[in-house]
Image (cartoon, rainbow, N blue to C red):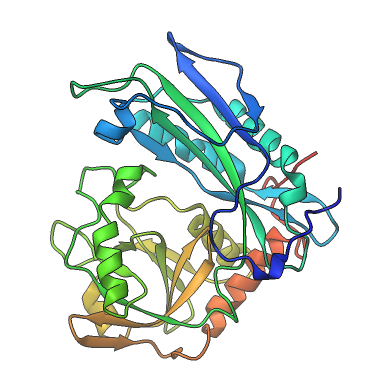
Amino acid sequence: MAKKDIAWESLGFDYVRTDKRYVSCFKDGKWDDGSITDDDKIVLNECACVFQYAQTVFEGLKAYTTEDGRTVTFRPDLNADRMIDSEKRLKMPVFSKERFLDAVDRVVKANEEWVPPYGSGATLYIRPYMFGSNPVIGVKPAAEYQFRILTTPVGPYFKGGAKPITVRISDYDRAAPRGTGNIKAGLNYAMSLYAIVDAHENGFAENIYLDPGTRTRIEETGGANIIFIDKDGNLVTPLSNSILPSITRRSIMYVAEKYLDMKVTQREITLKEVEEGNFIECGLCGTAAVISPVGCINDHGKEIRFASGMDEMGPTLKKLYDTLTGIQMGRIEAPEGWIHEIR
């Protein structure tokens, strides 16, 4: 299929309206059949539950053009599973895994001209989301919902290469110990907005949040999981019940162990051991950037610098990045079930 005539290499990581989107509505205890539509507008009552009580969850994944010209998505089954967990936690009706995967296929197929060509550095970002849509004034779950998927072509997260960033230790908490930190709810991101704007205004790329109970352990950032490489070249990631189970992080852990023969450990990581220099590389991982290298953590004026430096991504993170993106783009053979072709 011919691609849209746009400057793919010039795309930023911003919303661009595509031709089609998917929508299904829940009413009277059941989901309708769902459909593809041209209409990008949503009309809701002023008292809709999503406006009053933030009853909304979402996912994020991408469609790619592989080296051999196929249009694919990366591990969409895990996005479906995670969205179901989010829906259950906010007392929303489950949109089944089978229907989720079918809806993703349908909306990507309908927008296949918008899937950037191989080698452009761009991808088609896919945003499934659900929200309570009927009027609710008393504090309770909605009775009606919309499940929708929008798509937008996005450029590479980094222009000119993945340069190491400086992040800071935040004074704020990202999530309560038994709260909603382990699901992808809009409310988690709303609470991080003040902190991220303040971080940017003070010259930092992101915030690292500590555990809210003791404020001694590393958890994650406002929009990404954290990974470390220790002095022995092992991959170490934080363990916490309030960390979002990143699909990218789980994929990196598998790639590290099965493709690169690295030892992989998921455990509690204290800020103290990071300060003591136990790790030589650090990265933030997620759908948008895959891996964003961290060169320095600022802890209230005290700088914690990693041996990998501020000039380029460290060598071990670079191997992980190249291997995972190679799998996504079809240059490296993928584990069974990781690459889903849109037919």
The location of residue 153, given as percent across then percent down, is 64, 55
Instruction: Name above or below for residue 258 compared with residue 315.
Output: above
Is residue 260 or residue 163 the one in the foreground? 163
Image quadrant holding the C terminus, namely top right
Q: Dividing the picture into quarters, in which one does residue 109 lie?
A: top right
239 sits to left or right of 8: left
Viewer-side residue, 72 vs 9: 9
Residue at (78%, 63%) from the top-left corner? 118
Q: Position of residue 261 (x, y in %)?
A: 60, 71
Outermost top residue: 28
Question: In the picture provided, is 27 more to the left or to the right than 78?
Answer: left
User: How many numbered marks appear?
Assistant: 0
Picture coordinates of residue 104 (x, y %)?
A: 64, 37
Residue drawn at (81%, 51%) of the image: 70
Task: Give the vertical position of 223 relative to 245 (above or below).
Answer: below
Q: Position of residue 99 (x, y in %)?
A: 60, 26
Q: Nearer the viewer, residue 155 or 322?
A: 155
Quadrant of res 273: bottom left
Q: Is residue 126 visible?
A: yes
- Residue occupying image coordinates x 26% and y 21%: 136
Between residue 341 and residue 336, name the one nearer to us. 341
| Residue at screen point 54% across, 54% down | 15
Vertical placement of residue 203 versus 122, above or below? below
Left or right of 152? Residue 342 is: right
Quick check: 183 above or below 317?
Answer: above
Kindly tell me whether residue 90 is visible in this rendering: no
**Left or right of 325 in this view: 180:** left
